[in-house]
Image (cartoon, rainbow, N blue to C red):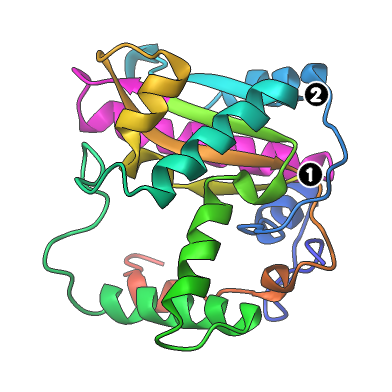
Amino acid sequence: MTDLVPSDIVPANPTEAAILSRRAVRGFLPTPVPQADIEHLLNVAARAPSGTNMQPWRLIALAGQPLINFTAGMVAGFKHRAETGGSERPYYPTPQYEPYLSRRRKLGWDLYGTLGIARGETDKMAAHGARNLEYFGAPVGLICMIDRKLQVGSWIDYGCFLENIAIAARGRGLDTCHMAIFAEFHTTVRRLLDLPEDDIIVCGVAIGYADPGAPANALVTTRVPASAFSEFRGF
């Protein structure tokens, strides 16, 4: 399933194939991923561009019982509405506007469509939200953090690092899901993992082998072509 690439783009090499086959996977097999493999992925990802080599990334990788305990605590907090304030660094603009609003809405309803969730079925939507906080059953979950004193350049570098994790994972037959929801529950994350206030929660990342039977994994998102967002001068 996740080896598929968009039909209108033909990868020219394995690197492009890894990029094009990357998906936000929302259903994983319980197959364990050894610590050595995760550590290797992170060492590869750490070669991301980093302004003046600051390397702003920091994270905790969870598996086994620590992951089970953490996700149970996250789901409990979610069900009891422990937090309503949102992430410490807003991910989206307020108010939202076009064309970005339409893109978000399309993704949301396309995803709910694969799950058989109709408009107004709030209980099913909440259940899906809880699955986010369980890393969709992945055997490895990351919590990614950044020093709150760092500025936008370091956040850009961090994005490159996160993308490298996803691409390096694809090169090993693994899949990922980058999950902003953990930043929205930063107080609960900090309490469960005993994290200092100096760090901001950037996101969570699920890592594992995609479950081919998970309905949500049938979703393939669309992308605007380069011709629509680029100007070419001097060619």
Q: How many marks?
A: 2
Res 49 visible:
no
The amino acid on which the numbered mark 2 sits, given as a three-letter code, is Asp
Which label's residue is closer to the chain start, 1 or 2? 2
| Label 1 crowd (10 A; few <14 / some 14-19 / many >=20) | some
The residue that mark 2 highlights is 37
Is residue 159 one of those drawn in magenta?
A: yes
The residue that mark 1 highlights is 174
The amino acid on which the numbered mark 1 sits, given as a three-letter code, is Leu
Q: Please give left or right for residue 75 compared with residue 177 in the image.
A: left
Whole-percent x, y for residue 77 in the image: 41, 41
Quarter of the figure that contains the N terminus: bottom right
Q: Residue at x 21, y 39 (%)?
A: 89
Q: Is label 1 in a helix, a strand or a loop?
A: loop
Give the magenta part as a residue range.
145-173
Camera-side residue of 111 and 102: 111
> Are discs 1 and 2 less than 8 Å apart at CB?
yes
Q: Main secondary structure of the magenta part?
A: helix
Q: Residue furthest left?
A: 95
Q: Please give left or right for residue 57 compared with residue 42 in the image.
A: left
Whole-percent x, y for residue 168 in the image: 70, 37
**Residue 210: which disc?**
none
Whole-percent x, y for residue 25 in the image: 66, 57
Is residue 11 one of those drawn in magenta?
A: no
Res 60 visible:
yes
Q: Residue furthest right?
A: 31
Distance Cα–Cα, label 1 vs label 2: 10 Å
